[in-house]
Amino acid sequence: MKRWGIIFLIFLCIVSWQTVSVYRAAMAPKQTLIEMAKQRAAQKVAFANIDAVDIYYGEKAYVVLEGTDKKGTKKIVWVPIKGGHIVVKRAKSGITKQEAIAKLTAERQPKEIISAKLGMEKGVPLWELTYIEQDNRYSFYYLSFEDGTFLKRYSFQQ
């Protein structure tokens, strides 16, 4: 009986090791994109610290970095993944995540908010809000980062 316990423990360790290995291999490309974006963003903004990083997959893919520069100013940087113009904005030049969520809540009354992240479409910085509607449809709601105006909305049928 003791032998089976040792064999099971060894098997469990091997499975755990392989699970971690597969996870790291799957996340490596994403980490590489983020590191390359940080290097490109450093040409425009000297971040003292980066608070949040998101990858937005729209018409063009962007890595969005939110952080504080060395002067203490909160900045947001949109770095296109496949080259192109890097956009830098002060965080206070647009609406906050909480304001975007409040606008969505007031206009659509979502059942559940899944995420709120920054992105860019056709040169316009935006908030992409992902949520579940009252009738259980998965939906996307886009607001302009600068003034919170409605841009577009997508819903998937059940």
Image (cartoon, helix red, strand yellow):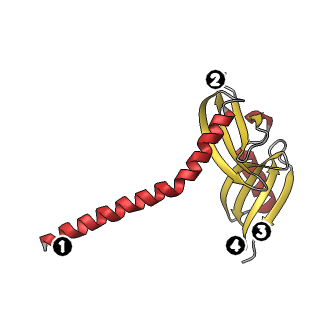
Going from the N terminus, do you reach mark 1 or mark 3 first?
A: 1
Q: Nearer the viewer, mark 1 or mark 2?
A: 1
Marks 2 and 3, how far apart at CA = 41 Å
Going from the N terminus, do you reach mark 2 or mark 3 first?
A: 2
Quarter of the image where one finds residue 37:
top right
Callout 2 crowding tier (Cα within 10 Å): few <14, some 14–19, many ≥20: few
Going from the N terminus, do you reach mark 4 or mark 2 first?
A: 2
Q: Position of residue 80 (x, y in %)?
A: 73, 45
* Residue type for callout 2: Lys
Which residue, given by chain and number where applicable, does mark 2 sit on? 70
Q: Position of residue 14 (x, y in %)?
A: 31, 63
| Label 1 residue SS | helix
* Residue type for callout 1: Trp
Which residue, given by chain and number where applicable, does mark 4 sit on? 136
Which residue, given by chain and number where applicable, does mark 3 sit on? 155
Going from the N terminus, do you reach mark 1 or mark 2 first?
A: 1
> Is residue 18 visible to the viewer in this orientation of the structure?
yes
Marks 4 and 3, how far apart at CA = 10 Å
Q: Nearer the viewer, mark 4 or mark 2?
A: 2
Find out whether the residues at labels 4 and 3 contact each other: C-beta distance under 8 Å. no
Which residue, given by chain and number where applicable, does mark 1 sit on? 4
Task: Look at the image and tell me in which quarter the N terminus lies.
Answer: bottom left
Marks 4 and 1, how far apart at CA = 47 Å
Marks 1 and 3, how far apart at CA = 52 Å
* Residue type for callout 4: Asn
Point 86% across, 54% down: residue = 151
Point 49% across, 56% down: residue = 25
Q: Nearer the viewer, mark 4 or mark 3?
A: 3
Callout 1 crowding tier (Cα within 10 Å): few <14, some 14–19, many ≥20: few
* Residue type for callout 3: Ser
